[in-house]
Amino acid sequence: LYLDALDPEIVSQGGSSLASAIRQATDLVRGEDPERRADYAVVLVSDGEALEEEDAVLRAAERAAAAGVVVHTVGLGTPGGAPIPELDPVSGRVTGYKRDLSGDVVISRRNDHLLGEIASITGGRFVRGDEPGATDRLLASLRGMERAAAAAGREARPKDRTGWLVALALLLVTLDALLAGGALQSVRKRRAKVAAA
């Protein structure tokens, strides 16, 4: 559902920092304890072009793997590349193409190698977003993780707490019997006093 709703328009500014994205996703699923293993999955949707060096991205992937975070990658775009259109926010029409500082048109190319390495390091899966069945393969990988976690005994199992409930019920019944017996004797004594008077 979320993959089908993805659109480049949901991001207001171009460019990508894959290392930062992986680090932040790892921190989010790990919580406040830096030593906690997460056993979660993150889906990274990108063209694979990074603003930083590839080594920084791979180090972030290794950090995620060490924390137990599996990163599945979805590659968007084409290996050959295409210019990045700039759209008029009102009409939605293309007004030109993104240019770099020297005035050249920016060409965005999908980096299958880097996206595949990220997935491989973390135990995830790389899929190309333009291939038929890519979403199904990704969902199958995610469901496979759920089954593996369940098979490993990580699923929630209810604990039997009926013993405490039975003990509490017996205590209340005993207390009720003692109070009722005391109240009954009190009533008999009052009747005996009234009858004697």
Image (cartoon, helix red, strand yellow):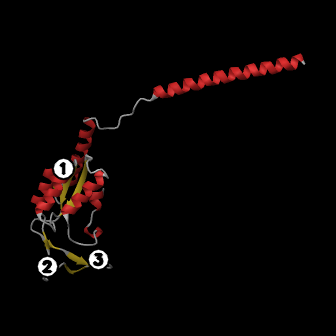
Mark 3: few/some/many CA within 10 Å (<14, 14-19, 20+): few
Disc sitting over residue 106 in the figure: none
Q: CA distance from mark 1 to mark 3?
A: 40 Å
Report which quarter residue 115 is drawn in: bottom left
Labels in figure, total? 3
Mark 2: few/some/many CA within 10 Å (<14, 14-19, 20+): some
Q: CA distance from mark 1 to mark 2?
A: 36 Å
Report if residue 160 is visible in the image: yes
Q: Nearer the viewer, residue 25 or 150?
A: 25
Q: Which residue is mark 3?
A: 92
Amino acid type at image mark 3: Gly
Mark 1: few/some/many CA within 10 Å (<14, 14-19, 20+): many
Amino acid type at image mark 2: Val
Q: Which residue is mark 2?
A: 105
| Residue 78: image location, x then y, percent | 13, 65
Disc sitting over residue 65 in the figure: 1
Q: Residue at x 23, y 44 (%)?
A: 145
| Residue 58: image location, x then y, percent | 13, 57
**Residue 76 higher or lower than 42, as above or below:** below
Q: Residue at x 17, y 55 (%)?
A: 61
Disc on the earlier residue, 1 or 2:
1
| Residue 117: image location, x then y, percent | 11, 55
As drawn, the residue found furthest toward the bottom would be 103
Report if residue 126 is visible in the image: no
Disc on the earlier residue, 1 or 3:
1
Q: Residue at x 23, y 39 (%)?
A: 148
